[in-house]
Image (spheres, coloured by chain):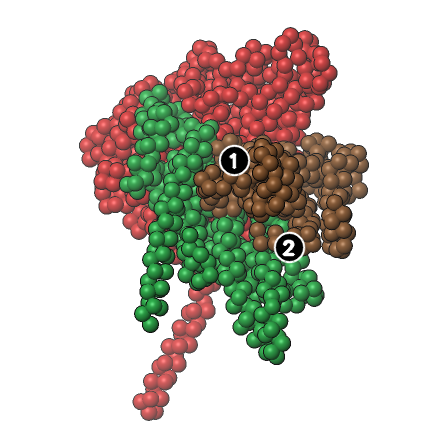
Amino acid sequence: MEGYLRALFKNRISILSLIIILFVIGLAVFGPYFEKHDPLETHMAKMLRPPTAEFPFGTDALGRCVASRIIYGARTTLLAGLVAIAIGAVLGTFLGLVSGFYVGKVDNLIMRGLDVLLAFPYFLLAVVIVAALGPSLNSIMIAIGIWEMPYYARLVRGSVLSIKEKEYVEAARMVGEKDSSILMYYILPNCISPIIIMSTVYYAWAILMASTLSFLGLGVQPPAPEWGVMTAEGREYLLFAPYLLFFPALFVCLTASAFNFLGDALRDLLDPRLHMR
Amino acid sequence: MGLFQKRDMQRFIKILRFIFKRLFLMAVTIFILITLVFFTLSFMPVDPVSILCGPGATEESIKAVRKEFGLDDPAYIQYFRFLKNLIQGDLGFSWRSRQPVIVEIMSAIPYTVILAFAAMIIATLLGIITGIISAKKQFSLIDNISMGISLIGVSTPIFILALIFIYIFAYRLGWFPTSGSETLSHLILPSVCLGLFVAASIARLVRASMLDVLRQDYIRTARAKGLSELTVVFKHAFRNALIPILTIVGMQFGLLFGGSVITETVFAWPGLGRLIITSINFKDAPVLQGGVMFFAGGFTLINLIMDIFYQFIDPRIKIK
Amino acid sequence: MGKNMKLLMVVLVLLTFGFTIHIGSPIMAQEKPKSGGTLTIAMEADIENLDPLYSGGPSMRVWCNMYEPLIGKDKKGNLVPLLADKWERVDANHWKFHIREGVKFHSGNPCDAKAVEASYERMHNPQKPHNHYAFSKWIRSVKALDKNWILMETAYPFSGTLDYLTSSMCAVICDAKQAEKFGDLMKYPSGTGPFVFDKWELGQYVQLKRNENHWGGKPYIEYLKFRFMPEDATRVMALRRGEVDIVFKTSVAMVNDIRKDPNVTVYKYPYLRVNAMEFNLSKPIVNNNPEVRKAITYAIDTKSITKDMIGEIGRVADSIVLDISPGHVSAGFPVYNPEKAKEILAMSGWKDVDNDGVLERGNEKLEFEFYTDYTRDYRNREVAQAIQDYLKKIGVKINLNIAMRGPFVDIVVNKLAHDLCIMGWQVPTNEPDWAIYTRFHSDFQKPGGWGTPCTRRADIDYVLFRARTTTDPQERLQLFGFMQQILFAENLILPLYYVNELSSVRKRVQNFMEHPEEMFSQRYAKVWLK
């Protein structure tokens, strides 16, 4: 635990990232108390106004307060990313544990299966899943989770393979402990570290993916506020009111950057080999 | 002399066997992929009849269309029919334009190839050079700046990058056309955009790899021998880092292809990626099916080629 | 003087002469149209194919320049002869048309009475259904009488016969022989129009070339190029930079900016399209509660929506029939009175029992599924959200579903799974028949019909059919007027706005036609480029 804290506070950049992350989370949780406008409420007479005192970030094409949409959008985006990597982590860890522990045929089968998933370039897999399930918040969470799954699986498998050789594991085996308890009590705890470290990076990916899918119209649907959707809506007014596109895009970049920085810092100081994954 | 040749021959046969094994694996992967895509898309809630028949269609015309497209048969029959047609090179007809799917895909593929090629060249050159320089001058201002930019590049969704490009270079400055694909200048913006996006990723990984290499003992030996920095970096470090660097570059193809889907959409570049996205928007299942297949299949093929390539260039890698 | 000197003098004189003429001629040629050049138009979507029977909206805008109907309408709505130069009504169900002499299809096949007959035969093949089959069902047969006269028999005395035949959407004449040769005309189109097919780069552009042998004289411009640019902003940027010459449906947000550009003119003119909110009357909760419909009508401020949201591209709609149509009668819309709406609901027993902001009565709840798409009327997304807001204020909950064209059509036309929707209704000509008959007559209800879902009502059918078949033009207009008032009284539909077209055209394009029918075949025939 101290390893984490030391790592986090050593670097100036990682402190900045932490601040940004806390700010965004704070925005999502406490924002609504400061910004009283309803993100869905339209003010028809005040459409497309630039930032003023009443509307700190201006209004969009329906006269909705951009600031409150950003705040509620933070909730949607952050939550979507969280659920997505949770799905990916749970499924992937399970597969990775099984695959790494029981090498041989099972390992081969699982890895080949995941290879099929990885045969889809970047986010084409997510696109196909969303096309099938219909565009919605749930579909993108599931799609991104399934997309992240092979990465977690490989990560965990790598850890398992190296831990398996350790003496205490051998000892436990010889004593006759059940496989499942070996996995649970010896191997899994040692995988947690890389999982957490890489989760920061995977979370950044999930956020990027969610906003990209929503931008393409394949994710969260309007009028729900979400940063990707807002960017798509703002795109029409690019020439006229670029701030409609600028603000949500900025937030996406900031949040993803912050998590990426954090992940970098953690990897640099705790486990540089993870950089190569 | 004789021993050398025999070892070579043995290795050659090993490589051939490896290639065949991998080709077989690739075929299996693609087959599973096709099946997976087919059944996943069968969940798509869509009824092409309304799209095809238009308003005021009578009962008979609806029945005729359903029969023509075989929509009344159960899923597994449709699947086998699909496979049968596939072997004959027939991917069916687009529900939207009634053109053969294969024609639409074949006209789109060259555009994606050109874009990917151009972007990859930009990405590789820029990414590798930046990565090496950053590694060499670790912790310097150049390192921090370029790694900062790279990280932001990796954290920016590519559609935002594309929109910024269009806004600044095409609209405000007017240097380049905004979309379309007729002349060379139409290619520049999308390929630079995609290239930068991938370059950011490459730069970071190359830096990490070079740092690893530069820490090695033989580098210190070379320096101790008094060789010039340039020689050290390029002759020794770079050569040894070459293989991991090429591996990194190979891994970026996924990013490249995926990123090209968005780039094509935003820049209206008529490639396979854009075809896939528009087919989703129009719920045109045959085109979507065929497009995804080709895209993923092509990607798998490229991965295979890269793998084989690595076998050849790195004698240290054991051939399984 | 030496020979060389003489030669030099002659040359000098000639040069001076030529130079003067050259200087003088632009002044003279200012009014004279120039021949040649490429007119580039930006399109929102890729075309499907080039066969009028098997393609939809985006393709129509391109092939309407290659195929012509028998008659046309000028921009004021008067009939003009196109392929048919003479016609007469023989009796209630028979018409004779004389096909212009010497017209040929692009393929070289002659366009005579026999060819026209073959074209109609092709259209009426129930085995190979096509997109506009339903609209031409009233034509019973077309027979060639001799070389240039055809006899058309109608199923009943359709009063809008001539009008219908002017529509580029459903009444163009195709080269049936060519279709037979190639199976269809999707890639090898052949019509009689002022432009012929040149090339089609899939996903990028379609280029047409002028028809040197067009019966109306060859067009001035040499090439007509349609480029596909799905992005609004991209189209406008391309226009500003001169990459395209015309952008249709300019968005309200950008039009003021564009007006400032000295190289561009913005034309504003009425368009044959109206947007309305439809009630799905096949759903019991919608059908059996007319007071709910009335309340909803009173709750929505269509005037504000049109003025504030739609802006220049809309005019407030007071009926379902366009204000530029003959027979238009104000049906009483808009009515905005949210207090009255609340009153009506309260008086019918709707109360908010569980305090969730939504009214209930018994076990019915005022919660509706609302669908809209925005591919053709891109502001409908915002309009739908505004409607959601208005209805929230009277206690009606709307679940918004903003869909792309395909799924929208699937839900609203096939499955009738919606409760309310916004439907943009484009009519091929300004005749009121299109707006009302095809919308409310049972003929156009399910299956797959585009009519406003109504429980089939014999009385409405009767009125509409009478209007269609009467030979008395006065009675016809009266009946349509009557129908429009029924709509208001029973709140069967809520008109939102009439659409205006904003076309941004570069100044070098001369003689741009502000024709309300988007697909008028002669639109570019007399356009020239400076």
Q: Does residue A33 sit above or below A196 in this rendering?
A: above
**Chain letter for mark 2:** A
Q: Chain letter of disc 1?
A: A
Per the image, the residue denoted by label 2 is A272
Taking the image as drawn, is residue A222 in sight? no
Image quadrant of residue B81? top left
Spot the red chain and give its letter. C
Dot 2 alpha-carbon crowd within 10 angstroms: few under 14, some 14 to 19, many 20 or more: some
Q: Quadrant of residue C492?
A: top right
The secondary structure type at the circle numbered 1 is helix
Amino acid type of disc 2? Answer: Pro
Disc 2 is placed on an element classified as helix
> Who's the residue at 49% across and 41% down the image?
A103
Image quadrant holding the N terminus of chain A, namely: top right
Point 24% across, 31% down: residue: C117
Q: Quadrant of residue C470?
A: top left
Q: Nearer the viewer, residue C9 or C211?
A: C211
Q: Colour of chain A?
A: brown
Q: Residues within 10 Å of mark 1 (few under 14, many from 20)?
A: many
The amino acid pointed to by label 1 is Val
Q: Position of residue B197 (x, y in %)?
A: 57, 55
Residue most toward the left? C146
In the image, taking residue C52 as reference, residue C458 lies left or right, namely right
The colour applied to the residues of chain B in this rendering is green
* Count of all numbered marks drawn on residues in the image: 2
The residue indicated by pointer 1 is A130
Q: Nearer the viewer, mark 2 or mark 1?
A: 2
